[in-house]
Amino acid sequence: MKAKLLTHKQQGAATLFTALVLLISITLVLLLTSKTVLVETQITADNYRTSQAAAAASAAMDQAVAYFNAGGLDQHNNTTPATLTADGLVDYIGPGNNFYNGALNVTAASEPSATSCSMPATTAFPLALTSGAQTTYAQFYFNNTDDNACDCQSTLTENVDGDTDGDCLGTAGTNMTRALVTAKGWSDDCTAVRTITQCVGTFDIFDAGSGPQQPFISRAGVGVFGNAKIINRYNNSSIWSGGADAVHGASYGTYLRPSGTESADYTTAQLDSSCEASPCNDASNPGPNDQLVSNRNAGNGIDVITNDPTLAGKTSSTAAANMTSTANNQFFDMFFAHTKAEIKNAANDAGQMLSGTSPVGLTGLIWEEGNLALHNGDVVGSPTNPAILIVNGDLDLTGGPIYGVIYVTGQLTITGNPVVKGSIVAENSALPPNGAGTLTLVYKPWSSDGNQAPPFSPGTGAVIAGSWKDW
């Protein structure tokens, strides 16, 4: 009997099994590929939104630094924001408050969120950045509270801030020249948030932070000086020149603090008074609190130094090619902590690099390119916020008052009845200062002498290197 062959019943099984395995494999590959595409799409979207948030935060930080550099932390009145008057309060102090108002109080309710992607009306500084159909959001705020991340530590022997820890921010006054800046940015759907913090402060214009130590300094001699009146109650020097002293008017005189007294014996108003002889008859300008030291008849006293070869031998140059050179500008380098080019750029960054424009009404660092005339009633600087006026040209000084330091590279001519409270420095070695006017020059040092709440000088704002943090 023959056996039956059953192999024909198994034909196609292997093929079917192979096809099934391939189908399952392809399905798995497709699912995996789809998942990968979805993940990559999500990652790309996340990266894009993160970059949006980072760009928005960076824009807010740039805005904050620009605002600070323009005038410090206090440029508006918090009660009436449209009033451009300092009121002793920080302008932007955190979200959740009215414009320029409130206490530092950062809350989520005052910021955009994924469920409410818009900037609340109460945000301290809203910044909407629109590109095409997309809008991102940002804000910044300042913090100058004691012992924050941007506080400094100078020395524990100084009690400049009222809490004996010798730092910059404290209780003796509100420091408007140093702060921690926080900038936050959101993506267009508010799902991504980036935060940047950075410290802002000021840099010293003058060497060691102190300005000229004499009321009048000239690299050349002192020309015909008219009936100038020079008063210095802070130290014992009135005039320092590299050349000879010329003939002066009958009423010319220099005055120092009375012998046997210290500057600490007087109030600031008494030290800065322009009244040199009784009766002063002005409660706001108390005096005289001084004694005559030099005049035309008696000659120069101990307060006048002339023909100093060290001063006369210093180099100076107004050539553009030498603006970055300290070797060619040794005289300028005696007073300033930076080169002429750096000082000019700092003034330009503050919008105070002028050419043919009067500096009247300005404070802080001012660079005047070209000749300048200041007339009676032209006020530059203020008693509380003096100016550093650098004239890269000739200066015809006929009025004022001028508060601060005047530095002239060209010819200084004094006519009329100008009033200066600060210092005058003349660089030109070939053209000594001269004039027939009646100059009233009252020395006032630039240094804040440890003042914990110094005024902000436009042009001196800067970012503290190494303070950038982002997350």
Image (cartoon, rainbow, N blue to C red):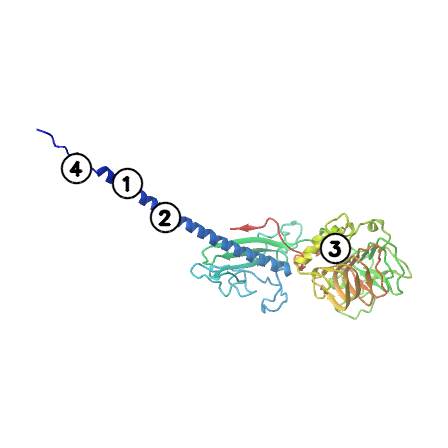
Q: Secondary structure at mark 2?
A: helix
Q: Nearer the viewer, mark 4 or mark 2?
A: 4
Q: Amino acid at mark 3?
A: Gly
Asked if marks 4 and 1 touch (Cβ < 8 Å), the reply is no
Sequence-first disc among 4 and 3: 4
Q: Amino acid at mark 1?
A: Val
Residue at image point 88% right, 55% down: 244
Residue 21, numbered circle:
1
Q: Amino acid at mark 2?
A: Ser
Residue 211, numbered circle:
3
Other-residue count near label 3 (Cα within 10 Å), few / some / many at <14 / 14–19 / ≥20? many
Q: Nearer the viewer, mark 4 or mark 1?
A: 4
Residue at the left extreme of this rendering = 1
Asked if marks 3 and 1 touch (Cβ < 8 Å), the reply is no
Residue at the bottom extreme of this rendering = 281
Quadrant the N terminus occupies: top left
Sequence-first disc among 4 and 2: 4
